[in-house]
Amino acid sequence: MNKKKIGVDFDDTFVKTTKYLLKFYNKKHKTKYKQGHMYSYAFDEILGLSRVEWRELETEFYNSDLHSQIPLRAGAVETLRAYSKKHDFEIVTARPKENMVFLEKTLEKHNARNLFTAVHSTGHMQNMHKRQKWEVCLEEGFILLIDDYPVHLNKAAEQGIPGLLMTTPWNKSFPLHKDVSRVHNWKDVGHFLKDL
């Protein structure tokens, strides 16, 4: 039986990155930002940082002890394991290649590396734009993309690849393509996967 391939975003879809990035920022700047304060994807603007300062913050965070403590989203491992006989899951991340070592360490720490058959980096977080996520979806033959960024999901849906949007405070007001559905947790994801 050929397994169907599904793309899974890493940050804020599989792991709780922003929550821990804000903890790092708060400790460094003695502030009290929470995820609920992040009402848009312009995190740098919300925090009063330039793009350069934001990139520097990300790099510092990736190299910090706090980064190694990022937990998985509740139910992520269980859901992927439950459907791994039927589907191959592949990470599609905007993290640049130089940050893949941190991603791999996080997967290993949580015994989750075997859940994914491949990891794809698009490099968007550093404005490299080597590939779009929808291009990876097409090239790899994905039947579904799970992400927290509606732009990626809408573009993939325009190419015929439906998506699941992991709801966060910063994506609540985005309009969605008709083939993109909101989910609030990995239990919701499981409800969709059982019918694929």
Image (cartoon, helix red, strand yellow):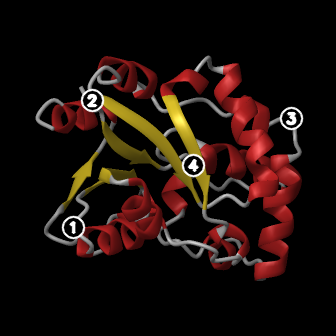
Q: Residue at x 35, y 23 (%)?
A: 84
Q: CA distance from mark 4 to mark 3?
A: 17 Å
Q: Amino acid at mark 2?
A: Lys
Of badges 4 and 1, the one in the foreground is 1
Distance (Cα) linking label 1 and label 2: 24 Å
How far apart marks 4 and 1 lie (CA) works out to: 24 Å
Q: Quadrant of the C terminus?
A: top left
Tag 3 residue: 65
The one of 37 and 77 positioned closer to us in this rendering: 77
Can you give x and y, in whole percent of width and height, for residue 194 in the image? 16, 29
Quarter of the image with the N terminus is top left
| Identity of the residue drawn at 58% across and 52% down | 120
User: In the picture provided, is 194 more to the left or to the right than 69?
Assistant: left
The residue where tag 1 is placed is 160
- Tag 1 secondary structure: loop
Where residue 75 sits, quadrant-wise, is: top left
User: According to the image, label 2 marks what residue?
Assistant: 187
- Give the label, 1 or 3, closer to the camera: 1
- 1 or 2: tag closer to the N-terminus: 1
Residue 100 placed where, x, y %?
74, 47
Q: Amino acid at mark 1?
A: Gly
Mark 2 lies on a secondary structure that is: helix
